[in-house]
Amino acid sequence: MDQAFTVVPLATSQIIHSKLSTFTTDGFQANIFIDKPTPVEYDFVQPNSVYLITAKKNCPFEPFLESHEKAVVISIPMYINLLEFFKSTWPKVKERMEKQFKKIRQGTMPIEVEPHIQFMLEASVCYESWINDAFLYFKKSSADFSPNTIHLQRDDKSILVNAEVMNELSQSAESLVDFLYRAGFIDGIPDLSSQS
């Protein structure tokens, strides 16, 4: 006897797309709402909304009902566009930056101008992009070997997101879209299958 058992979120569910923080990376969480949940404590939630929050390295996420006021809020299609940016565009930006930094770093041996006076050649890269009405800003120096952190801002709220964490989450975007459709979302999600 063949059997099938499937669990699917409802349109009023809180759908969470996240990557936990580790000792070396911040965590990221997208709290997705197709429709307003029924519990009264969720009255502030708007339909077709995604609340983006982060967690510091090695720390848990704050409960959503405590962190939502600090969240950057975007629409579901905008979140899918954001994931597509980190899947398709960000790797190209990162590759270009790393090629330039490699050339610069190979020439960053101290140069002595006069006795006891030296300088190092250094450069920085700046990248800006808009995803609908959300602004992404990235700046990094060739001397900076820390993780790539991007400033994400919409309206008067902003968060810092780890680009590699977002790239990892973007790999599950098609599955997320499938779950959203199965939960009842029908309002203009970009087709990711043609963009891969």
Image (tube, rainbow, N blue to C red):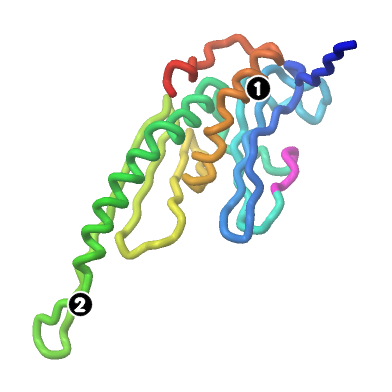
What residue is shown with label 2?
110
Residue at 33% across, 41% down: 93
Quadrant location, the N terminus: top right
Residue 165 found in image quarter: top right
Q: Position of residue 102 (x, y in %)?
A: 27, 58
Q: Classify mark 1: helix, strand or loop.
A: loop
- The residue positioned farthest toward the right in the image shown: 1
The answer to whether any part of residue 70 appears in the image is no
Relative height, residue 2 to residue 120 (above, below): above
Q: Quadrant of residue 36?
A: top right
Q: Which residue occupies the extreme front position in the image?
A: 1
Please give left or right for residue 12 compared with residue 124 in the image.
right
- Position of residue 90 relative to residue 38, above or below, is below
Q: Which amino acid lies under the numbered mark 1 shown in the image of this protein?
A: Gln
In the picture of the structure, the residue carrying the numbered disc 1 is: 46
Secondary-structure class at tag 2: loop
- Marks 2 and 1, how far apart in space? 56 Å
Q: Which region is colored magenta? A: 61-65
Q: On screen, 54 above or below 58? A: above
- Residue 19 percent location from the top left of the image: 63, 43
Q: Nearer the viewer, mark 2 or mark 1?
A: 2
Query: Residue 119 or 174: which is nearer the viewer?
Result: 174
Instruction: Tell me if mark 1 has few (under 14), some (14-19) or many (20+) residues whose alpha carbon lies within 10 angstroms of its own.
Output: some
Q: Residues within 10 Å of mark 2 (few under 14, many from 20)?
A: few
Q: Residue at x 34, y 38 (%)?
A: 92
Q: Is residue 27 left or right of residue 86?
A: right
> Does 64 lie within the magenta span?
yes
Q: Is residue 174 above or below residue 96?
A: above
Residue 117: give x, y in percent of width and height: 16, 84
The earlier-in-sequence mark between 2 and 1 is 1
Q: Position of residue 76 (x, y in %)?
A: 57, 22
